[in-house]
Amino acid sequence: MLDLNEYTTELEAPLHRSQKALWIKRLITLIVGFLIWHLPIPLELSPDAWHLFAVFITAILGVLLEAVSIFTASIIALVAVVLLRVLPPEKAFSGFSESFILLILAAFLVAKGVIKSGLGRRIAFLLIRRFGKSTLNLGYCLVVTDSILGPSIPSNTARSGIMYPIVHALCLDTGSLPTPEGRKQTGTYLMMTYIAGQTISSALWLTGMAANPVGARIAADFGINMNFGNWLFVASVPCIIALILIPFVLYKLYPPINKYTPEAPEMAKKGLQEMGPMSKKEWIMGSTFLGMILLWAFSPVLNINLAIVAFLGLSVLILANVYTLEDIRQGGGDALETFIWFAILYMMSTVLNDMGFMKTLGAQIATYIGGFNWVTVYVLLTVIYVVIHYLFVSQTAQLLALYAVFLEVAVNAQVPAALMAFMLSFATNYFAVITPQASSSNVLFAGSGFLPSEEIYKQGAVITVLNTIIFLVATPWIHWASSL
């Protein structure tokens, strides 16, 4: 018979090895960061810009190596940039005042209200009753739904706020839980399929993402006309191909455990019968949610801030006792965690951009490829523009920093201007799952418990490569359609 002490020792041994491996990864991360910090400062950058880059890239490396969580990496980075005198405290804390980051926090809490009221479960049952015979069907249902919302909701972050509680409820009601094993049932697949599909639904429409019209304005300076109609026409072929392939590729490469659920529609039907008619809280939640969607859709016309709409909705839910202060105290920890890490990483990326790091890097890269033939320049600029997004925590920030620089290099190398302009605009959307922080629309899903950061890095890289290949292969179509 095994002695109790021997049994305890056997249990502790794997834990000890795991802790030892974890600290080795942390030591490697620290050494790499120290070496980058002390490298000769290149490209005539300021010492502060280089040192901020060293801290930023070390934080990202720590997450990639799974040495620390993205939250832990972010707060250590925040402490480092202040204590090492890289940034003053007021600049280091500036990310917490950004309205679109506050939108994420408010949308996270509103989403919890949708779930608590039962409305999220009801919508999930309705979708499962219609499409729930397989997890793959549900994946297609999500990307199609977001594509339909795309032209009317001019913010991918706002759309993610609409869809998150529905996707969350779908995960729960198809047998998934936000635990290491439970999320493998359907949760990770459905969450990843949605944010991956949104990279394409945003690229499909000129109004699908806030940065798209900004790119169109910059392109106009080069004599390129981008409007709602020709954008949709040029985007249609590569986007339709990508929307068909993304759910299928994720399903094959990272399959959910629970693939086929022929009994699910009948179970959903029974679930709806058990729920009965909509409750008072569901009606209040539904009316509030609909009001938020309409205000988000017409926000450009009404000149209403998106975050204020979310806080207005949250206020109504609290006053109506649909989502209470006690609920926030008990279940708002993940919302706060997500808000903190994203605000910190966004701040560092933005300050790097303000210090000229991104523009200098982009211009330097561009000078090395200017001598090639136009096809090579076009492909290299596209790939570099995508890969460099590892350093950005905002699609719009990258577009403002690099779009004109890359487009000018392309035009000088005889790349057709319209082709390059549309490709850069599409890339600003389709690289949005390359990291958890690559787009603010990812953040709700990254904080759900169903989609850990390391999965987004891994699966997001695959989807980004897939998207890039699809759009590059579609170059003849984009070239022809953009020249009309």
Image: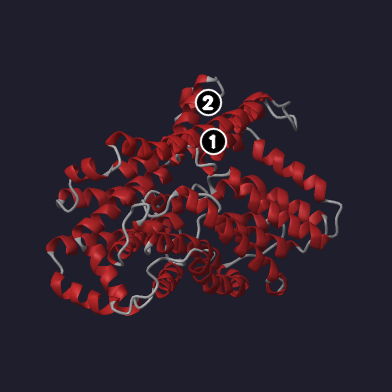
Give above or below for 380 relative to 31.
below
Can residue 433 be seen from the camera position used here? no
User: Could you tell me the amino acid type at mark 1?
Assistant: Lys
336 vs 259, nearest the viewer: 259
- Tell me the quadrant of the picture where the C terminus can be found: bottom right
Residue drawn at 36 percent across, 40 percent down = 11
Q: Residue at x 41, y 44 (%)?
A: 101
The mark lying in front, picked from 1 and 2, is: 1
Residue in view at x 54 percent, y 33 percent:
24
The reply, left or right, for residue 304 in relation to residue 40 is left
> In this figure, which residue is indicated by the disc labeled 2?
81
- Image height check: is 12 above or below 191? above
The residue that mark 1 highlights is 25
Locate residue 430: give its quadrant. Answer: bottom right
Instruction: Judge the density around disc 2: few (<14), some (14-19), many (≥20) Cα neighbours within 10 Å.
Output: many
Q: Amino acid at mark 2?
A: Val
* Distance from Cα at disc 1 to Cα at disc 2: 21 Å
- Please provide percent x and percent y for residue 403: 66, 51
Image coordinates of residue 125 in percent, x first then y, are 26, 71
Q: Earlier in the sequence, mark 1 or mark 2?
A: 1
